Image: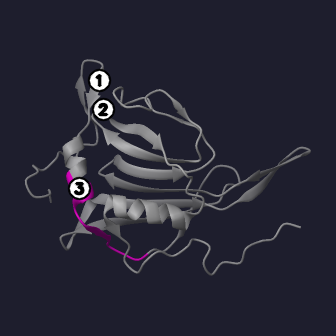
């Protein structure tokens, strides 16, 4: 069901080719309208293990969002979390800090997101934006939908060092309420101590 005043978008996740560029299936104005609309997750947070390569143990929660009381299967909130861990490579012991992200998707498109991790991000879209083609070394960054679509990010300073802090930052900007409130992914779990 489209938002008021917006035409229904095709369900095909492929983009429309324009010479060597692709036109996203959703415009910046449509994204801004969706972000401005009050939303609530359709279900309370229940963290589930997310399969990953190696020994990284990710947990994920995903839910469609309610807009004006209607569940929108095409508007999805997703949050992922990986706890701090120690990796051993030969004689080297490497401490990896927590990593987490929160995202709002419309169809297949990540229209808004906030990430905290130790990887670098370089924006390959958003040629008119200040962070275009600049590597972001900051631990936290915010993904913003631009005319070319997804893939543009700006630093968030100071860094959002906990998943709770990231959620406090993300939720008002996405105009999203969590049914049942926020539940930390480690709540009720025994944490393994490394001696």
Which residue sits at x=45%, y=66%?
168
Q: Residue 165 at what x, y percent from top left?
A: 52, 64
Label 1 element class: strand
User: Which residue, given by chain and number where applicable, does mark 3 sit on?
Assistant: 34
Residue 175 lies left or right of residue 85; in this view the side is: left
Residue density around tag 1, few if under 14, some if 14–19, many if 20 or more, within 10 Å? few
Which residue sits at x=27%, y=34%?
147
First in sequence: mark 1 vs mark 2 = 1
Which residue sits at x=45%, y=41%?
154
Rendered image coloring scheme:
one colour
First in sequence: mark 3 vs mark 2 = 3
Contact check, label 1 and label 2, Cβ < 8 Å: yes
- CA–CA distance in space, label 1 to label 2: 8 Å
User: Which residue, given by chain and number where applicable, does mark 2 sit on?
Assistant: 148
User: Which residue, given by chain and number where applicable, does mark 1 sit on?
Assistant: 21
Q: Residue 25 at what x, y percent from top left?
A: 23, 40
Q: Residue 119 at what x, y percent from top left?
A: 61, 42
Label 3 element class: helix
Count of numbered tags: 3
Range covered by the magenta-colored residues: 33-44
- CA–CA distance in space, label 1 to label 3: 25 Å
- CA–CA distance in space, label 3 to label 2: 18 Å
Location of the C terminus by quadrant is bottom right
Label 2 element class: loop
Which residue sits at x=41%, y=37%?
151
């Amino acid at each position: 069901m489209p938002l008021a005043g917006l035409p229904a978008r095709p369900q095909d996740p492929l983009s429309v080719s324009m010479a060597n560029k692709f036109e996203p299936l959703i415009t910046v104005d449509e994204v801004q309208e969706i972000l401005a609309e009050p939303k609530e997750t359709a279900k309370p947070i229940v963290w589930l293990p997310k399969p990953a390569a190696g020994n990284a143990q990710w947990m994920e929660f995903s839910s469609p969002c309610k807009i004006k009381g209607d569940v929108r299967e095409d508007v999805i909130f997703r949050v992922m979390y990986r706890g701090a861990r120690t990796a051993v490579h030969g004689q080297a012991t490497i401490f990896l800090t927590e990593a987490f992200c929160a995202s709002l998707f419309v169809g297949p498109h990540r229209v808004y997101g906030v990430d905290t991790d130790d990887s670098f991000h370089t924006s390959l879209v958003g040629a008119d934006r200040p962070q275009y083609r600049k590597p972001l070394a900051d631990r936290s960054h915010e993904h913003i939908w631009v005319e070319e679509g997804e893939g543009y990010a700006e630093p968030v300073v100071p860094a959002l060092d906990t998943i709770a802090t990231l959620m406090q930052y993300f939720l008002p900007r996405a105009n999203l309420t969590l049914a049942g409130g926020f539940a930390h992914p480690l709540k009720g779990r025994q944490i393994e101590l490394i001696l």
